[in-house]
Image: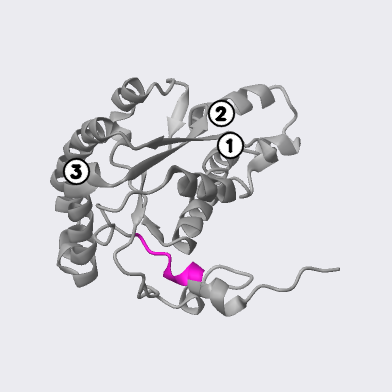
Amino acid sequence: MNAPPFDVAETDRLLTTTRSVRRRLDLERPVPREVVQEALEVAVQAPTANNHQNWRWLVVTEPATKAELAGMIRSSWQFHLNDIWTRAGRRRHDAQARRNHASAQALIETIARVPALVIPCVLGRPPDIAAINAAWRDRMADKVAEDPGHQVQHGETRASIFYGSIFPAIWSFQLALRSRGLGSTITCLHVPHERAVGRLLGIPSGVTQVCMIPVAYTVGSDFRPADRYSAKERTYWERWGT
């Protein structure tokens, strides 16, 4: 007997109201370990290239360790302010951009108090696209000009597989958290300190730290769909630009 169809309205509500939560994280309410583990069990059902399942998840809840991570994140934030934000030009005056900026700033100030910080990792290092493509060209050097292998580049495929096998699981984790009354966001501000973070947490140098996900219960649950361009306005059929 086939399983009953999903409640589309409820599924769509989950998908369209799972927001990046920064200012409405409940910093006082503890997050039980079993709730995080439950959400991770949902996450690992996400698609993964060739069924590698080469993700690993590190959950940090110790206050002293979170404080050390927060110090590194604040350092990265300052570089971000001095570089990326100052180059944003007129976008800095956009109302939505300023709200996002203020929200990110609020998270930086409170991240040490967030109950759990989850670091999704991938075994291995990100592919070097140029090196992979150069090695393939060397391999094809003695092949006849008509060989279709001359038209192939593997570097971009390897990079797509590497990150494409972890981000579906990250999003599933965030959806599972939202369905349980918790909020989250993705931040990459610890990544510039990847080696120091690795030493602090015992993460081997051959493992890639993809991002960090602060996790907490939310203050209220009345999240709404974001103001987005319609997909119809940004979708082409058959050919680009048509």
Q: Tell me the magenta residue range.
A: 14-20
Secondary structure at numbered mark 2? helix
- Identify residue type, mark 2: Ile
> What is the CA distance from the residue labelled 1 to the residue labelled 3?
30 Å
Residue 43 x %, y %: 56, 49
Residue type, mark 1 in image:
Arg
Between the C-alphas of marks 1 and 2, the distance is 9 Å
Earlier-in-chain disc, 1 versus 2: 2
Q: Residue at x 38, y 64 (%)?
A: 19
Label pair 1/2, CB-CB below 8 angstroms: yes
- Disc 1 is placed on an element classified as helix
Which residue is pictured at 13% across the width and 44% down the height?
82
Instruction: Classify mark 3: helix, strand or loop.
Output: helix
Relative vertical location of residue 146 with respect to residue 131 in this rendering, above or below: below
Of the pair 115 and 120, the residue shown nearer to us: 115
- Residue 177 in view, yes or no: yes
Which picture quadrant has residue 49?
top right
Front tag of 1 and 2: 1
Residue 132, given in percent of the width and then of the height, sits at 56, 28
Q: Which residue is mark 1?
A: 158
Of circles 1 and 3, the one toward us is 3
Q: Which mark is residue 41?
A: none
Q: Is residue 239 left or right of residue 103?
A: right
Corner quadrant of residue 62: top left
Q: Which residue is mark 3?
A: 77
Judged left or right of residue 145, residue 124 is left
Q: As rendered, which of 102 and 84 lies closer to the eye? A: 102
| Residue 242 shows in the view | no
Q: Which residue is mark 2?
A: 132
